[in-house]
């Protein structure tokens, strides 16, 4: 009897008209946009920091990080607050759409060309019905040594 892959939940969010996914266990909360305090001498994709319930949290604009055209925030824009290696980091996304249940077996290796996001940021691709989600590798997206300093 074949063992079924471990079940997991993914948060689906939108960026530049495409859907991306990150595991729920890496997410602390999803917040509406709030005032971001700019920080000098950081990478251009780091928009600054926020004080979220007493925790100073760096905020990364994923559009900027992935080299996409930056746009003004809309009413559906959100900050997805994640935890990676005990570091809280917020990502600005166009919208947080959905939560889906998958198994690890549903994640297929990333093809050589995945839209406009570099392959190094991609863990794999999930296809559910007619929807396709790009699963991001947050360790690569963040390059933690840049954020720590």
Image (spheres, helix red, strand yellow):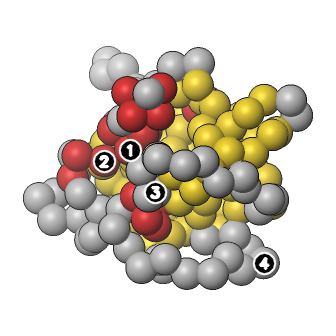
Question: Going from the N terminus, do you reach mark 3 or mark 1 first?
Answer: 3
How far apart are the alpha carbons under marks 4 and 2? 27 Å
The residue closer to the viewer here, 61 or 110, is 61
77 on left or right of 92: right
Q: Quadrant of the N terminus?
A: top left
Disc 4 vs disc 2: Cβ atoms closer than 8 Å? no
Q: Nearer the viewer, residue 2 or 96?
A: 96
Q: Is residue 148 above or below residue 46?
A: above
Q: Position of residue 93 (x, y in %)?
A: 59, 63
Residue highlighted by disc 2: 121
User: Residue 87 location in percent, x, y?
Assistant: 58, 25
Question: Alpha-carbon distance for marks 1 and 2?
Answer: 6 Å
Residue 126 visible in rendering: no
- Which is nearer the N-term, disc 4 or disc 3? 3
Quadrant position of residue 28: top right
Callout 3: few (<14), some (14-19), or many (20+) C-alpha neighbours within 10 Å? some
Tag of residue 141: 1
Which residue is depicted at the point 47% across and 47% down?
A: 41
Q: How far is the residue under mark 4 from the one under mark 3? A: 21 Å
Q: Nearer the viewer, mark 3 or mark 1?
A: 3
- The kind of secondary structure element at disc 4 is loop
Q: Are marks 1 and 2 in contact (CB under 8 Å)?
A: yes
Residue pointed to by mark 3: 45
**Residue at the image point whose x is 42% and y is 79% from the top:** 69
Q: Write down the residue under mark 4.
A: 75
């Amino acid at each position: 009897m074949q063992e079924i892959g471990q079940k997991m939940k993914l948060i689906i969010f939108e960026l530049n008209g495409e859907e991306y996914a990150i595991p729920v266990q890496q997410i602390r909360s999803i917040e509406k946009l709030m005032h971001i305090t700019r920080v000098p001498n950081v990478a251009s994709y780091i928009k600054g920091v926020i004080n979220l319930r007493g925790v100073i949290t760096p905020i990364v604009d994923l559009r900027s990080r992935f080299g996409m055209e930056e746009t003004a925030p809309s009413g559906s824009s959100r900050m997805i607050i994640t935890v990676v290696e005990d570091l809280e980091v917020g990502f600005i996304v166009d919208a947080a759409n959905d939560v889906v249940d998958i198994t690890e077996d549903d994640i297929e290796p990333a093809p050589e060309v995945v839209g406009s996001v570099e392959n190094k940021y991609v863990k794999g691709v999930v296809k559910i019905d007619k929807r396709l989600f790009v699963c991001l590798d947050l360790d690569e997206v963040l390059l933690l040594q840049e954020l720590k300093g």
